Image (cartoon, rainbow, N blue to C red):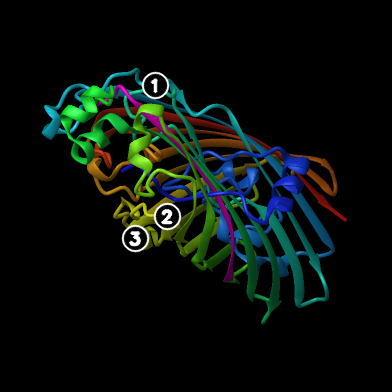
Amino acid sequence: MIKLHLSAAPSSHNCFRCLFSFLLCFSAAVHSAGIAVMEQSVKELGQAFSGAPTNFSDASMVFFNPAAMSQIRGKLVSTAGYVIAPSAVFHDSASQLSPVLGGAPLRGNNGGNSPDLVSVPNVYYVQALNHRIAFGFGFNSPYGMSNSYRPDWKGRYQAIDSEILTLNFNPSLSFKVTENFSVGAGFNVQYLDTKLTNAIDFGTICLPALGPVTCAGQGLLPQSADGHVSLKGDSVGFGYNFGAFYALNQNTRFGVSYRSRITHDVHGQANFSVPTNAAALTLGGSFIDSSTRTSVTLPDSVLFGFSHRINPHWEVSADALWTHWSLIRELRTNFLSAQRDDVMDLRWRDTWRLAAGINYFSADNKWTFRTGFAYDQTPVPDSSHRSPRIPDNSRYWLTAGITYALFKNINIHAAYAHLFLDDAGINRRGTTGDFLVGQYSEQINIGGLQMDWRF
C-alpha cells in the first residue's frame, strides 16, 4: 500500500487557478508552525507580528483583527509581496526496509535542499462608511506548503512532491460601539488546491501478495520495481472571523480576534504508474487510476495582543496566538476503487506562538525602525509522527523592519526575518514497512516589501 495523504485532483475550480496564476504567479512554503502562513503584513513582519491584533496602521487588520478597521478614516489599500528562501536538508542515519524483510538499508540520496525559493502576495482594502462603520476585504493565503525531493531519494516511498495552496477571500465589517471600543467580523471563502506524489515499492508489495518465488521470477524485488502515484485535488470551504479592539487611551491598545476552523471536502484523482512486471498487482482493482476524496479541517485560532506608546519615539507590543492543530489527528484518503483507505497518522497538538516587538519613530515621523522576536511551537508531537512532507519543528523568529513615509498618504514598508529551527529528528514508518530515519537541518529567510495608500 502506498503513502497517500491530503488527497487528490483538478475538479471544476480551474477558474480559480487561472485567475490567480494570471494575477500573482504564487506558490507557498511552510514558514510558520504546521502549514500556517504568517506573512500577512510586511509592516508586522518587522516586529515579528507582535502588534498584529492592535494594528491599524495598515489594512492587514482585515485578517488579524477586523474590529480595528473602525479606526480608519477615508480609504486604505495595502499590497505586499514576500520572498521566502527556506532550506531543509535531510541527513540519513539508519533508513531501512521493513525489519520483516531483513531491514536492508534504503537505497538513494538524501533528497537535495528542499524546497526552492517561493513568493507570497496579499492585498487588503479598508473604507470608512461613516463615523462608526467600516468595510474591508482581504485576499491572501493563510495556509500553504511547497516541498520537493529528488525522485530517487531514500524517502521516495513516503514523499517526493508536496504542494498545498489556499486562497482566501475575506470581506469584513467593523462597528465602533464607543469611541474606545469596537467590534468586527468577517466571512471567509477559501479555495484549497493540493498536489502530492511519491514512489511505490511494488517489489515489497508483491511478496505477501504473490509469494517470494513468483515475485523473484518476475523481477519484483524490494527497491527494484518502483512505481509512482500522483494525487491532485481541490475544494472550497467557508468560515468566519471576528474580533474586538479597545483603546485604553491614545497610547495603549488591546485586541483579541478569532478565526474559525474551515472544513474542506477535497475531491480529486489518483494517477498511478505501474511497472509492466507488476501489472498482476492491479487485477484486484488496486493501483488503478480512480477518483479520491479526503476530508480535512484547517484549525481555528485565537490571537491576543497589546501595544503601548511609551513616548513620542518608542512603542512596545506583544501578542500570543493559540492554534487548534489537534483537530488534525489523521488524514484519510478514500478511493473509488477496490483500494483500501490510506491513513496518515499525524496526531498534531495545539500550539502557542508568543511574540514581542519594539518600534522607534524618528522626530519628523518620516522613518520608523522596528524589530521583534517570536517563539513558534510545532504541532508535531515526536519523530515518529514527523512526515517528510512537512518536516516541521519549533522555530525562533528574529526580525527587523523599516517604514518610510514617501508622501503624506503613502507609506513604504520593508522587513526581513530569519527563522532558527532546531534539528528535527524523524523515525517514520511508511505504508510498506520502510523506516525513514535521520534528521533535518532547517532555516528560513524571509524578505518583504509593502505599500500603503490612503485616499
Task: Using the rendered view, name the quadrant where residue 416 is placed.
Answer: top right
For mark 3, give the secondary structure: helix
Residue 249 x, y percent position in the rendering: 61, 68
Q: Which residues are magenta?
A: 222-242
Q: Main secondary structure of the magenta part?
A: strand
Q: Quadrant of the C terminus?
A: bottom right
**Between marks 1 and 2, how big is the CA–CA gap?**
28 Å
Q: Position of residue 263 (x, y in %)?
A: 50, 65
Question: Looking at numbered disc 1 in the image, what kind of residue is underneath it?
Answer: Asp
Crowding at dot 3, Cα within 10 Å, few <14 / some 14-19 / many 20+, comes out as some
Tag of residue 152: 1
Q: Nearer the viewer, mark 3 or mark 2?
A: 2
For residue 289, say whether it is visible. yes
For residue 423, side relative to residue 448 (left or right): left
**How far is mark 3 from mark 2, CA to CA?**
30 Å
Tell me the amino acid under the disc marked 2. Ser
Which quadrant is home to the N terminus? Answer: top left
Q: Is residue 211 above or below residue 252?
A: above
| Magenta stretch encompasses residue 227 | yes
Residue at image location 26% in from the left, 49% down from the top: 381
Circle 1 or circle 2, nearest the eye: 2
| Residue annotated with mark 3 | 326
Rendered location of residue 452, percent (x, y): 77, 48
Q: Regarding mark 1 in the picture, which secondary structure is present there? A: loop
Identify the residue at image location x=51%, y=51%: 50
Q: Look at the picture and state if 425 lies above or below 110.
A: below
Residue 64 placement, left or right of 139: left
Q: Circle 2 is placed at which residue position?
A: 337
Say whether residue 392 is magenta. no
The residue sitting at the bottom extreme is: 177
The Cα–Cα distance between marks 3 and 1, rounded to whole angstroms, is 33 Å
